[in-house]
Image (spheres, grey):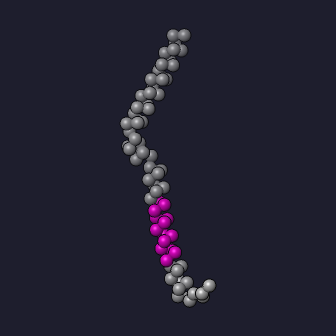
Amino acid sequence: MAQRSPAEIRSSIQSNRMELALSVDRLRGEVSRMTDWRGHVQRHRPELMVGTALVSLLIGGRLLRRRRG
């Protein structure tokens, strides 16, 4: 293996730092997007409304059965 000069090592370290900084920024963006519950609600509003309606019907039906029986 060839020996690297101090300048080459410094250059490699600087390059690695820059790549790491970019990776951390991308990761921050992904974490922010994934934990944005308001955004998830906004994107999936129709599904949430249907799910809420179904759960309400199920709970209401069970409550009616208990009162009758």
Image mark count: 0
Given residues 4 and 11, the one toward you in this image is 4
**Quadrant occupied by the N terminus:** bottom right
Image location of residue 42, percent across then percent down: 38, 43
Image location of residue 30, percent across then percent down: 46, 56
Image location of residue 15, percent across then percent down: 49, 77
Residue at 53 percent of width and 83 percent of height = 10
Residue at 44 percent of width and 32 percent of height = 51
Image location of residue 56, percent across then percent down: 45, 26
Compared with 20, 9 (above or below) is below
Compared with 24, 37 (above or below) is above
Give the residues in magenta: 15-28
Given residues 35 and 54, the one toward you in this image is 54
Specify the principal SS of the magenta part.
helix
**Quadrant occupied by the C terminus:** top right
Q: Quadrant of residue 46?
A: top left
